[in-house]
Image: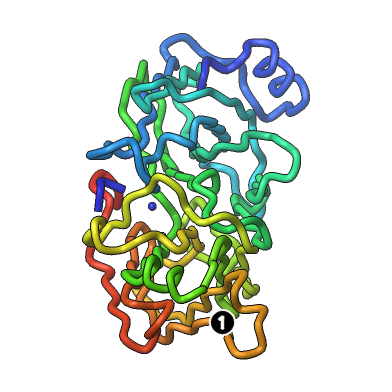
């Protein structure tokens, strides 16, 4: 696999946070913190999973010494990644205090209809499915800097990691199927039971939903990760999974399945794991029983 899954905080915003919460101290001298936030380095930036769509970075700063089941965001901020996939976050924090800082990057920012929502009190992202398949815009990354003790100026790099498994389906018989009169133009996918929440602090997942991606145009201009000259992309989707390897039943949908004699193609016991790419491929349009699977590619720079 090709190597696969903020700007300076406004002074006014920091002052507002300090005024609205008496427990927040004014920044002391020597507490300047600078992060160089990086998306994983990729071998190519032309295909699915190259990381270049996740241009919007958001960060949330917490008091790591606070107790209780819920957390309070001291302040947050945003930044955009440059062409080098780097963003700089500069914070004025209080010398002697300890902080947790949560980073999240996607392509949506605060746009309406975004599929990811963050709850600051639980430090949890909720994933919404039911959007178009084959959408590279759904790629996202995160990292949490835990228990950062401020004793003076800090400058450090942070590499984000992808919380998803990437599911790719490719076929070797697309042209043969077309010649036989099978005009496939749209594909989708669903998995009956998948988690839909991710705790950005400890990496655990929760919830149970149908992870469905609705019919959309076939991927165009993308090379399938296995024998690109042989296999044509049918669909690519990102699904939230846990850190440990597990198996799921994947259903490929398409606009040709509306006919009475064709059903959604099901792939059982498909291995998936966070930050791994799973490839399903074969002569799937004419002989879907003969398929192959691989889950051996991992994005370098991710953990």
Residue indicated by mark 1: 264
Residue 261 in the image: state x and y as whole percent.
60, 90
Note whether residue 255 is visible.
Answer: yes
Secondary-structure class at tag 1: loop
Residue 278, given in percent of the width and then of the height, sits at 34, 67
Q: Residue at x 32, y 81 (%)?
A: 291
> Relative to residue 122, is residue 105 depicted above or below?
above
Residue depicted at 54% across the width and 50% down the height: 135
Residue at (32% x, 51% y) in the render: 223
Q: Position of residue 84 (x, y in %)?
A: 34, 23
Q: Position of residue 147 (x, y in %)?
A: 42, 41
Vertical comparison of 63 with 129: above or below: above
Residue at point 22%, 66% (across, down)? 296
Q: Residue 195 or 191: which is nearer the viewer?
A: 191
Q: Quadrant of residue 199?
A: bottom right
Numbered label tally: 1
Task: Give whichever of 137, 31 is nearer the camera.
Answer: 137
Q: Quadrant of residue 133?
A: bottom right
């Amino acid at each position: 696999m090709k190597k696969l899954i903020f700007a300076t905080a406004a002074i006014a915003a920091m002052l507002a946070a300090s005024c609205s919460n008496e427990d927040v101290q004014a920044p002391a001298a020597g507490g300047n913190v600078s992060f160089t936030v990086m998306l994983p380095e990729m071998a190519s930036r032309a295909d699915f999973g190259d990381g270049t769509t996740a241009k919007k970075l958001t960060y949330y700063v917490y008091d790591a010494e606070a107790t209780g089941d819920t957390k309070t965001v001291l302040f947050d901020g945003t930044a955009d990644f440059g062409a080098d996939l780097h963003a700089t976050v500069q914070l004025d924090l209080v010398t002697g205090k300890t902080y947790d800082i949560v980073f999240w990057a996607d392509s949506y920012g605060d746009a309406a209809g975004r599929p990811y929502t963050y709850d600051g009190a639980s430090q949890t992202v909720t994933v919404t499915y039911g959007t178009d398949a084959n959408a590279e815009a759904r790629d996202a990354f995160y990292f949490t800097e835990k228990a950062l003790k401020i004793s003076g100026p800090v400058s450090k790099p942070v590499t984000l990691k992808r919380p998803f498994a990437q599911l790719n389906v490719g076929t070797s018989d697309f042209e043969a199927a077309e010649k036989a009169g099978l005009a496939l133009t749209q594909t989708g996918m669903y998995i009956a039971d998948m988690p839909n929440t991710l705790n950005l602090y400890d990496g655990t997942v929760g919830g149970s939903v149908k992870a469905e991606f609705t019919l959309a145009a076939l991927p165009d201009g993308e090379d399938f990760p296995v024998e690109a000259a042989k296999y044509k992309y049918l669909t690519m989707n990102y699904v939230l999974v846990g850190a440990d390897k597990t198996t799921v039943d994947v259903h490929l949908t398409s606009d040709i399945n509306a006919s009475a004699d064709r059903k959604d193609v099901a792939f059982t016991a498909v291995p998936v794991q966070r930050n791994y790419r799973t490839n399903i491929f074969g002569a799937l349009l004419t002989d879907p029983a003969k398929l192959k699977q691989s889950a051996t590619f991992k994005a370098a720079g991710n953990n």
